Image (cartoon, rainbow, N blue to C red):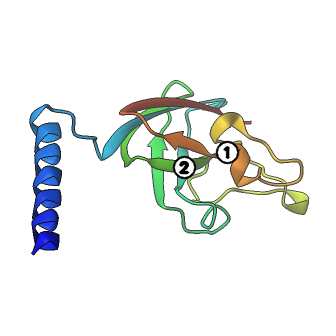
Amino acid sequence: MKQLNLFILFYFILFILTSMNTFAGQTTPSTADLTIHITGFETSAGIAKMALINSKENYTEETPFKGYDFKITNNEVIETIPLPYGEYAIKVFHDENKNNELDTMVFGIPAERYGFSNDARGMFGPPEYDAAVFKLDAPKKEISITIK
């Protein structure tokens, strides 16, 4: 019987604390607004293809967490997207001919400009996930990416 009373008391206190946060307007938001500013485009032709990555496991995969096609205006992109709090990385490239792929030259060298969050660059290929990752842990966050 004593255990039952403690159990009820515990849940009553938990309910009160949860209610106090809700009524005080102190609930933690579940999503944030991420504003992305992409520069380095030589022209406004084509689109900016962006892949949003939400884990180290899907960083190298063909299918990202989310994919976006952004219109380029005045040689830049400024977009705001709502996202759950978490850890992310971004890959972006300028798809000038709108063929939905990063065109390459000899030896697989990209023919179109590309970039990563944190302006991370790799020596012989894409940068490591740890170089491109950022935390989305505030209601609003802005990041800049320069494609090269």
Using the image as rendered, state which of residue 7 and residue 56 is in the foreground. Answer: 7
Using the image as rendered, state which of residue 55 and residue 119 is in the foreground. Answer: 55
What residue is rendered at 38% in x and 47% in y? 83
What residue is rendered at 62% in x and 67% in y? 57
- Note whether 100 is above or below 68 in the view shown: below
Asked which secondary structure carries label 1, the reply is helix
Q: Can residue 95 be seen in this view?
A: no
What residue is rendered at 12% in x and 38% in y? 20
- Mark 2 = which residue? 88
Quadrant position of residue 34: top left
Q: What residue type is labelled 2?
A: Tyr
State which quarter of the image contains the N terminus.
bottom left
Q: Can residue 44 be seen in this view?
A: yes
Q: Position of residue 140 (x, y in %)?
A: 39, 30
Mark sitting earlier along the chain (1/2): 2
- Mark 1 = which residue? 132
Q: Which amino acid does label 1 sit on?
A: Ala
